[in-house]
Image (spheres, helix red, strand yellow):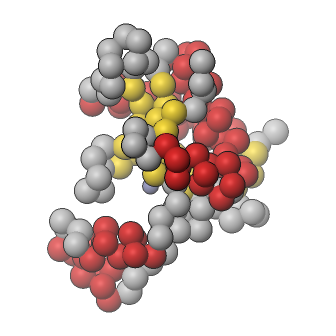
Amino acid sequence: MKVLQFKAGEEKHLEHEFYYMIDKRLQSILYFIAGYLMVVHGVELVITQLHRTNEEQDDIYRSHSDAEVQAAYRANPWVSVHQVNRGADVRVRWPKKLWPYKYLNREEQDEIAADLDSQLDERFEYDFGRKQTSVRHDVGRGDHIHIQVDSNTTTLMKR
Ligand SMILES: [Zn+2]
């Protein structure tokens, strides 16, 4: 059984980004999460986005559905952790053998996202505890869980 699943149709570049580009701490966290979710919740982790180019970042925010976000970005563009290989977007689904490609419903996803938050908070400290390693959001690309690590000094593994 493969622990890591990549979004259908994008496996090739996502696998390359996973093994060769992303921050090693993020790589370890994703591997941990995938195993944890499978064992504890019986679900598969699917990695849907890793690296983001400057053009992709512009595309997302220059045409963002929230006019305020769009204006703020146009006035002062910000860099996403995805652009510097410290961010991953993931979704969770039931194993294919049960229900082909069926993703969890919102309540099921809520429960898992909350558990993931506490599991990660117990183990990792992002920006001295001021930010979270896992963030649930729905920013124009559908409901998903965003996993991030900060610069070398501010995501620390707790003892
Ligand atoms: Zn993200």
Between residues 126 and 147, which one lies in front from this camera angle?
147
Query: Splitting the image into 4 quarters, where does residue 92 fall?
Result: top left
Residue 67: % across, % down: 17, 74
- Give the camera-side residue of 105 and 107: 105
- Residue ID at (40%, 18%): 96
Residue 135 visible, this orientation: no
Q: Residue at x 29, y 52 (%)?
A: 141
Residue 79 in the figure: left or right of residue 15: left
Residue at position x 43%, y 18% in the image:
95
Would you place residue 63 above or below residue 114 in this image? Answer: below
Kindly identify the residue that appears in the image at 52 percent across and 52 percent down.
13
Q: Position of residue 8 (x, y in %)?
A: 40, 38
- Quadrant including the N terminus: top right
- Quadrant of res 94: top left
Horizontal relation, residue 144 to residue 41: left or right = left
Whole-percent x and y of residue 83? 53, 68
Q: Is residue 115 above or below residue 152?
A: above
100 displayed left or right of 124: left
- Residue 66: % across, % down: 19, 67
Location of the C terminus by quadrant is: top right
Residue 39 appears in the rendering: yes
Q: Is residue 103 left or right of residue 78?
A: left
For the image, the number of numbered tags is 0
Figure quadrant, ligand 1: bottom left
Residue found at the very far top of the displayed protein: 98
Return the residue nearer the eye: 130 or 101.
101
In the image as oriented, which residue stretches furthest toward the bottom? 75
